[in-house]
Amino acid sequence: MSENRRKLIIEKLNLNTEPITGTELASSFEVSRQVIVQDIAILRAEGYSILATSNGYIIPKIHGQNRIIKTFVSEHKGFERMEEELRIIVEYGGKVIDVIVEHPVYGEIVGTLLISNMDDVEKFIKRVEETNAQPLSLLTDGAHVHTIEVPSEKIFKLIKAELFEKGFIKEQ
């Protein structure tokens, strides 16, 4: 029964391009959310690449060859600035894959975001506000790294130029 459920979880995650919450999975399989959390842990141990995002579980899809992955160092404080930074990236067609901070004790901490449009930005900010969650950059006095996916080098340069202009990054 549980092996079959895990197989169906993988099928469901593979068919979806959007994250699915543990609560949604639990409801569809008529089990508790904790059972789903345990299933996800087992599936990961079996080698499945399942990401836990703020919007639920997702299996990352392989990106098209016309998209490139870039990183940049950013710095800001406050939720308004965080929202502004995310909006700038997605307005140019970028996708915010993650945020990374370098903690002096724990080392690199990565938060998977997968924010690709304005609706995702709004959902993320709303969730942060509703849960009173603190951004990871709070651990590093505002400094953080973003991994983003962009359609071209030109778009990446436009994003960096606006982030520089607005004071998010120090160098273009």
Image (tube, rainbow, N blue to C red):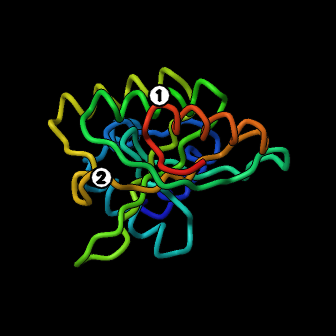
| Point 45% across, 45% down: residue | 113
Q: Position of residue 136 (x, y in %)?
A: 28, 53
Mark nearest the camera among 1 and 2 is 2
Q: Residue furthest left?
A: 132
Q: Nearer the viewer, residue 62 or 3?
A: 62
Q: Is residue 25 left or right of residue 162?
A: left
Q: CA distance from mark 1 to mark 2?
A: 19 Å
Q: Which residue in the protein does label 2 denote?
A: 137
User: Residue at coordinates 25% horizontally, 76% vertically from top-left?
Assistant: 104
Tell me if residue 58 can be seen. Answer: yes
Across and down, in percent, residue 65 comes to 85, 50
For the residue pair 89 and 95, the one nearer the viewer reads as: 89
Residue 94, quarter of the rendered image: top right
Can you see residue 5?
no
Instruction: State the image coordinates of residue 108 (x, y, percent, origin top left).
Output: 38, 71
Mark 1 vs 2, N-terminal side:
1
Q: Is residue 57 above or below residue 109?
A: above
Farthest right residue?
Answer: 65
Query: Which quadrant, please, contains the N terminus?
Result: bottom left
Residue 12, how many percent across, how many down?
A: 56, 44
The disc at residue 91 is none
Crowding at dot 2, Cα within 10 Å, few <14 / some 14-19 / many 20+, comes out as many
At mark 2, the secondary structure is: helix
Amino acid bearing label 1? Asp
Question: Residue visible at 65% across and 46% down?
Answer: 149
In this rendering, position of residue 32 left or right of residue 96: left
Q: Measuring 43% from the left and 53% from the top, which residue is drawn there?
A: 99
Q: Amino acid at mark 2?
A: Ser
- Can you tell which mark lies on residue 120? 1
Above or below, 117 against 11 in this view is above
* Mark 1: secondary structure: helix
